Image (spheres, helix red, strand yellow):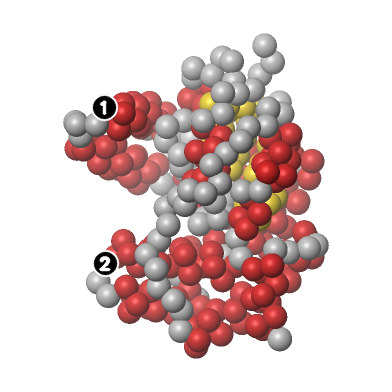
Amino acid sequence: MAQATLLFGIGAAKAGTTWLYRYLAAHPEVRLPAVKELHYFDTVETGKFDRQVTRMMRERKRRKDRLPTGDARLDKRLQREVWAYTGWLNVIREGQNDAGYLAYLNHGAEAARVVGDITPAYATLSEASLSRMAGLAPMTRFVFLMRDPLDRLWSNIRMAATRKGGDLAVTAGTLLDKVLGGDDQTMAARCNYAGTLARLNAAVDPARVFTAFYETLFQPDTLARLCGFLGIAERPANTEARVLAGEDLTMTEAQRARAMAWLAPQYDAVRGHMGALPQRWTDNMEALA
């Protein structure tokens, strides 16, 4: 049997990647690890494998500590994730290990047409890393999802603020100030669709890249295009379920105005790359006028 296509889901964060992971993981022609975000290539760039090992050990422990739950189905899923983290730890403890990475993705995937790694942080990778990923297997594919820049940023901030605790509005406001003021380069980089698109275009054959909008991801025609792009059979999906929905919090008008002014180049860049934009995007762009 021909070697499976290697799929990289590279982001964007808070733009539907978890829903995409679950949709593809349930597909009989796709094999994805129980660990959704492997963070392999961003760790290769930084060289901080010890920190990544610590993080993955923490995630494994969180799942071990929940067992048993009394729910047989949940217990089975948690145990599968514990095994997946254990296997992945064996790979990354060796540092950069492309052969181990590929073996991990292909383990138990004999009948799969697609194997893959969906890690939103890959959207911030360098051109050199994206180019190396493109050459890692005979057939590689990249999927990059984009959500309205303002909605994506605010969703990311609300998630981070919820994790920090305290007054949600105050914490979210502080985090937004840091991003807009240049003091949070990590979150700012995840807002930079223009940079991701430029690096992808320079590093990867456009025929190997699928770009789509979160706002239209759940439509049958988008899923049909995605399945065709990956070479797998089209399958229906649950398009009603919300995945990892954050705490509700509305931006103030002042916050919205500042954020939109800062994000204006992203709207322009994506419109130049994609042409027509979803209604949500154009509504926000009109507010800039």
Quadrant showing the N terminus: top right
Question: Tag 1: Cα neighbours inside 10 Å, few (<14), some, or many (≥20)?
Answer: few
The tag on residue 72 is 1
Kind of element beneath mark 1: helix
Quadrant showing the C terminus: bottom right
Image x and y of residue 121, in percent: 51, 51
Q: Is residue 276 above or below residue 3?
A: below
The residue lying at 35 percent from left, 77 percent from top is 169
Kind of element beneath mark 2: loop
Res 61 seen here? no
Image x and y of residue 124, in percent: 57, 55
The residue lying at 31 percent from left, 61 percent from top is 163
**Is 223 left, or right, of 98 in this rendering?**
right
Amino acid type, callout 2: Gly
- Residue 133 lies in quadrant: top right
Q: Is residue 203 above or below residue 282?
A: above
The tag on residue 165 is 2
CA distance separating discs 1 and 2: 32 Å
**Is 74 left, or right, of 287 in this rendering?**
left
Image x and y of residue 52, in percent: 37, 43
